[in-house]
Amino acid sequence: MMTCPRYGDMGASLYVPATHKSLESILADGCHGARSLILCTEDAVAADAVAWAVRRLIRTLQAAPAQVTFLRFVRPRNPFVLRQLIEVPEALARLDGVVIPKFDDTSAPEWHDVLERCPQLPVMPTLETPSLFREDTALATLEAVQSLRNPVIALRIGANDLLGAIGLKRQPGQTVYETPLRSTLERLITLFRPAGYELAAPVCDLIGETETLSREVAQDIAWGFYSKTCVHPSQLAVIEEHFAQALRRQKQQAHALLNSHDAVFQDAGQMLEQACHSHWARRIATLQSTS
């Protein structure tokens, strides 16, 4: 039986193409201290390289150490690729779960057909299709997630696909909250979190813009995201330091609330109420700090 990773253990999840020249060492030794790796056979791999990349990935997984200090996931390009992984138990045993791309109510049946072969496999559906732009189809996607038998670690948000659907690309100096996706992110939080699902913040694809990344992660934290997609090792330390600092501060307040018998009190210049803030405090208490 697979153990389902906790959302709080994900941290900055580094995407690695399955075509990466150092795939063997990355699967064995990790990459720049990332807490979780996502080996991608989808958008990061050219169409004519998919078959080779999947074969190579399966062989490399089979040869990888069984126990490592970081989490390993695969993002299969489609249900057929996932079926190939499931059919090789030695490769599947090296994984902590799979990331399902472009998951919504229309793609769900195909994924269900494959996942029913391995109902204990933890999954992270990625929300990145235009169905999220409308309330009715976003609700249908929520119902599709709820119909999964597999344990759901979190839902990942694919900002680049969502921007691409409306013919946009993030510009230099622009956080995702300064794009038209802001209202979509609000919908995802208010729709999926009350249903019990955690969400991973989308990637900041502006590599080398530390100030922009810092501003974005600060907003991620303000909106309750404590996992984030990462596409370059240089982003890891920035994201993890923001998470660690915020959790140190928030865990102190959460501890104070959870150990108080007062209905309302002041802590660090802020009013805390048992009725309003207990859910937040219990959630923060489950998250892991890297410090």
Image: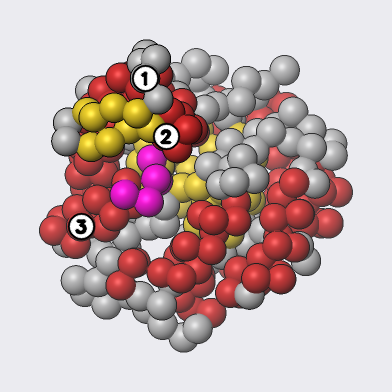
- List the residue tagged with mark 1: 262
Residue type (three-letter) at the residue carrying disc 3: Arg
Image quadrant where residue 149 sits: top right
Of label 1 and label 3, which has the lower sequence position? Answer: 3
Q: In the structure shown, which secondary structural element does the residue marked by tag 1 occupy? A: loop
Q: Residue 144 appears at what percent x and percent y?
A: 76, 54
Residue 233 vertical placement versus 140 (above, below): above
**Residues in magenta?**
222-226
Front disc: 2 or 3: 2
- List the residue tagged with mark 3: 215
Name the residue: 47% across, 33% down.
275
Residue type (three-letter) at the residue carrying disc 1: Asp
Name the residue: 70% across, 39% down.
85
Q: Is residue 70 left or right of residue 45?
A: left
Crowd around label 2: few <14 · some 14–19 · many ≥20 (10 Å) = some
Crowd around label 1: few <14 · some 14–19 · many ≥20 (10 Å) = few
Queried whether the magenta region covers residue 282, the answer comes back as no
Front disc: 1 or 3: 1
